[in-house]
Image: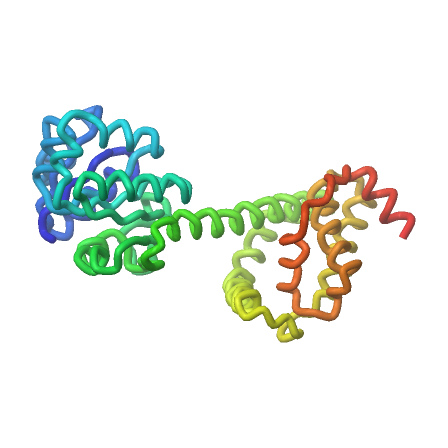
Amino acid sequence: MNTVTVLGLGSMGFTIARLFLQCGRHVTVWNRSAGKADTLVASGATLAASAADAVRASDLVVMCVYDYASAREILQSPGVAQALAGKVLVQLTTGSPQEAREALAWARSHGAAYLDGAIQAAPSQMGQADTPVLLSGDPQVYASVQYTLKDLAGNIAFLGEQIEAAATMDLATLSYVYGATVGFVQGALIAETQGLDVGMFGKLVADISPTFGSFFQHEGAVIQSGDFTISESPMRISIEATRRILQSSLASGINAEIPAFIDGLFQRADKAGLADQELAALIKVVRAAPQPAQPARAAAVEVQAA
């Protein structure tokens, strides 16, 4: 598709429109604040007077706004639903699995094809060979627009027909990212407490990240298989390591909330008899009913008594 409409010109929406223009597409844009389109118009984009006019201009409509509430408000504005009939709407606004299901039902009720997506990069990282974008929906619809969407990202992961797949995997990967962020901050605290260079700690983390990426890929395959026979990392090693992190944090007098929580999970794994299984067997603990939160001070008493 050589004609594309972009709804929403925040930092990401602006970048999306710019990339389409740079790839030679005929781009129509619309934004509540029309002034945001000035640079794009100077580069060849057409500014529509209304969201409905923008949708009418192209067979492919790409939307990226602040949230689904904003998206719904735009899509329900006068004339937009009627203009979408027969078009493909690609929603790149970050949302929940339930919002993806509701958006698909709404689009179908108005005769539009729909793909749900999640961008896993900053605006400055868009348009590169390794830029990650998740998409899900009808495979035939995806096939009709995939080459156009590659203007935005070289690493598009199409996750199949289950419409909520992109939103779900976005939540899953963000869970990893924020879990790693919390661990990184605790590590920085440990390093600075000993007077070490936290910048060097950051470099060490960057250096080991590719290796751990491959490790987690392996652990994901282990969980999918259901076979937790030791293949890379025995659980018992991590049980000991996480207890050591907690003990060291307590001995240093630093905040031990994070290591206490992590140690609690691994102690439950030990009590469940998982020490001689692959590390990924920790998911068996997480799948179980949640345990009451244990304050770091209580964990300290338990550790010292052990």
Q: Nearer the viewer, residue 98 or 215?
A: 98
Which residue, as the protein is rendered here, is positioned at the far front?
A: 109
The residue located at (89%, 48%) in the rendering is: 304
Q: Residue at x 52, y 57 (%)?
A: 206
Direction from residue 169 to residue 204 in the image, left or right = right
Left or right of residue 146, residue 171 in this image: right
Relative to 141, residue 111 above or below: above
Q: Quadrant of residue 37?
A: top left
Give the side of residue 158 with respect to residue 34, left or right. Answer: right
Q: Position of residue 295 (x, y in %)?
A: 77, 37
Residue drawn at (73%, 65%), measured in percent from left and top?
Answer: 274
Quarter of image, res 223: bottom right
Name the residue rendered at 63%, 75% in the picture: 231
Give percent across and percent down for residue 127.
26, 52
Residue 90 at what x, y percent from top left? 24, 46
Q: Out of 64 and 13, give the one closest to the viewer.
A: 64
Question: Which residue is at the far right?
Answer: 305
Q: Is residue 175 visible?
A: yes
Query: Looking at the picture, does residue 272 appear above or below residue 72?
Result: below
- Give the number of marks: 0
Q: Nearer the viewer, residue 188 or 229?
A: 229
On the image, the x and y values in percent for residue 78 come to 16, 25
Q: Note whether residue 211 is visible.
A: no
| Figure colour scheme | rainbow
